[in-house]
Image: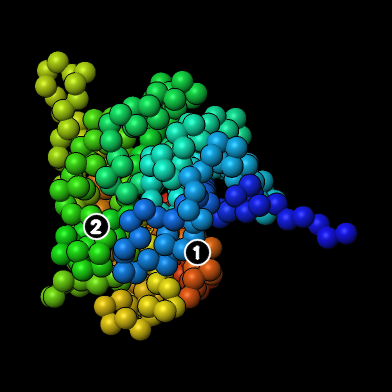
Amino acid sequence: MEQRQPAPRNEAHKVSFRPARINGRESGELFITLKTRNCSWGKCLFCGLGKTDGDGKPLLYSEAAAQLNGSIRSFTDKGGDLKRVGMVSLITNSDSVFNTETVRRKALLGMLGIIREKLPAVAELVFESRAQFIKTAILAQVKSRIDDLFGTDVVAKTVAVGIESPYDSVRRKIRKGLPDSKLTEAAENAAEAGFGFRGYFIYNLIEPKGESRVNNLMDAVDLMTYLADRKAMDPMRRDGEKVGPKPSLLVVRGYVPERLAATPLLRRFGEVPDAIALAELQRVADYAKLSRVRFEVDSTTEDQQMTASMTVMSPAYRAALVKYNTTMDPLQLRL
Ligand code: SF4
């Protein structure tokens, strides 16, 4: 008899692990990508997944629980150690976990309970969102749920935004729909709610005329510093002292769908030879260290294997990224 396949919404969708140093400990970040509706924006020129990966419906609690449990199972089935998961990133390809049309609120808050129960070593939770959904009310609700589950301020909370390029003009060109003003507002909301602020930036995207790839990423570091310096008023502080969000930056190599591979505006993100890419990342990692911005690199390959028009990382290149992420020593960024 033919076996009935479980519906894709009730099983792990995508899960990947990035070995990293988290909270001073060698552990790693578990990325859990949830299957839900497509991205509500859907206009970014380079988008390889968010426009196509969903199925039009918001994620309900039962589906979210099944996907999260399935993801955790799939991680352990491949030999993953739950005690080594120091950070969990909840991702939706790539709208917002805070948008109730994408993830029902009950589903989001419910998943936190499962993480508490199954992942005992978690020290930081990251929530991916387009900037316009980063509002203080939802952040306060999520923070209060996390503090109830884990203890007050035991676990760091971070919002992550696909910023892609530090330049407003480039973001306009690639139709990101993310002006600097929205970014600033989101960072201030994060600061006010006690969340860190992480930006995803694409290595070897396009630069404005005259800029180099290295300058591009150094400007990304400066942008994160600027956003962290935009002090948000903390209403609980009587002395008027202000706090900004803790800035961090994750660099990805990026991917574009095959049908767009020949678009002159877009590059094959993996076209830079490994040794050059690592030397450039090393310079930026040094600069980020000086700037006190947490600088990380994406060493996962799952998305790359699924999408055309990119170079899957070579083992030596990936090994260098892992060595860096787990030591945070820029000198490890070499072949
Ligand atoms: S916001 Fe993200 S998922 Fe949505 S279209 Fe842009 S790149 Fe794609």
Task: Out of 191 and 330, give the one closest to the viewer.
Answer: 191
Is any atom of residue 334 visible in this view? no
Q: Is residue 277 above or below residue 243?
A: below
Nearer the viewer's eye, disc 2 or disc 1? 2
Which quadrant, please, contains the N terminus? bottom right
Task: Out of 242 and 102, give the one closest to the viewer.
Answer: 102
Image-based side of 294 in relation to 35, left or right: left
| Residue under the point 58% across and 33% down | 114
Q: Is residue 92 above or below residue 268?
A: above
Give the quadrant of residue 140: top left
The kind of secondary structure element at disc 2 is: loop
Sequence-wise, which precedes: disc 2 or disc 1?
2
| Residue under the point 38% across and 51% down | 95
- Residue furthest to the front in view is 56
Q: Is residue 116 above or below residue 26?
A: above
Answer yes or no: disc 1 within 8 Å of ligand 1. Answer: no
Task: Classify the position of ligand 1 by quadrant: top left, top right, bottom left or bottom right.
Answer: bottom left
Amino acid bearing label 2: Gly
| Residue under the point 18% across and 54% down | 179
Image-based side of 257 in relation to 69, left or right: left
State the image coordinates of residue 286 (x, y, percent, origin top left).
27, 57
Q: Which residue is mark 2?
A: 177
CA gap, disc 2 and disc 1: 23 Å
- Residue furthest to the right in view is 1
Amino acid bearing label 1: Asp
Image-based side of 73 in relation to 97, left or right: right
Which quadrant, please, contains the C terminus? bottom left
State the image coordinates of residue 134 (x, y, percent, origin top left).
30, 40
Residue 303 is tagged as 1
Is any atom of residue 163 visible in this view? yes
Q: Residues within 10 Å of mark 1 (few under 14, many from 20)?
A: some
State the image coordinates of residue 280 (x, y, percent, origin top left).
29, 69
